């Protein structure tokens, strides 16, 4: 399953969700509208690499997407939010040498059971072990934004 995020939202988000600001809508808007500003140099670049939904998982009885963004540089970002935290996997053609300032524990190697909805092959080892391919847990959308801002700045993505 690989579906454009907006198409997935059109099929799965309810009118009540939109009217009452439920949990899915804010996280989807964050992935669709906010993160691309950090990751793409132009609208045209974004149009060619829009976020997609590759899978789903359920948290507090809400069906949620597992997002994926493939960047022009070859980096593939897979992530999900379950209302408590964000899980992010990075697969990059080059090392990402960034001081993440404590946003996550660089030594933690996650088991696939903690990455609900992720295909198992997309859950990688610890950042400290492999700076090209790693998986992390990040507490909030603010921290996810900072994580991607640090990567974007260091890697000159935009």
Image (cartoon, grey):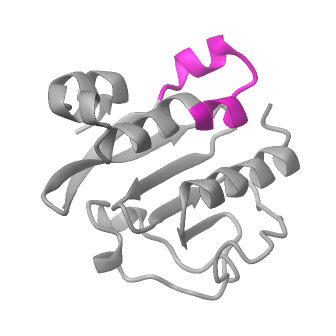
* Residue 120 appears in the picture as rendered: yes
At which x and y percent is residue 22?
28, 43
In the picture provided, is 22 more to the left or to the right than 46? left
Main SS of residues in magenta: helix
Residue 12 higher or lower than 146, as above or below: above
The boundaries of the magenta stretch are 34-50
Residue positioned 45% across, 33% down in the render: 29
Residue positioned 68% across, 72% down in the render: 103
Q: Residue furthest left?
A: 61
* Residue 14 appears in the picture as rendered: no
In the picture provided, is 154 more to the left or to the right than 109? right
Quarter residue 47 falls in:
top right
At which x and y percent is residue 94?
75, 55
Residue 137 higher or lower than 4, as above or below: below
Magenta stretch contains residue 40: yes
In the picture provided, is 58 more to the left or to the right than 42? left
């Amino acid at each position: 399953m690989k579906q454009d995020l907006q198409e997935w939202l059109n099929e799965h988000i309810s009118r009540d969700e939109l009217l009452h600001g439920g949990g899915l809508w804010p996280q989807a808007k964050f992935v669709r509208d906010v993160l691309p500003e950090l990751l793409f140099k132009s609208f045209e670049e974004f149009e060619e690499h829009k976020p997609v939904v590759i899978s789903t998982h359920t948290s507090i009885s809400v069906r949620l997407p597992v997002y994926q963004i493939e960047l022009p540089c070859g980096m593939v970002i897979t992530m999900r939010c379950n209302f408590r935290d964000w899980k992010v996997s990075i697969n990059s053609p080059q090392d990402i040498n960034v001081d993440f300032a404590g946003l996550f524990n660089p030594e933690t190697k996650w088991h696939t059971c903690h990455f609900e909805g992720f295909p198992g092959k997309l859950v990688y080892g610890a950042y400290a072990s492999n700076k090209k391919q790693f998986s992390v847990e990040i507490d909030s959308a603010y921290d996810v934004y900072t994580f991607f801002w640090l990567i974007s700045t260091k890697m000159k993505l935009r």
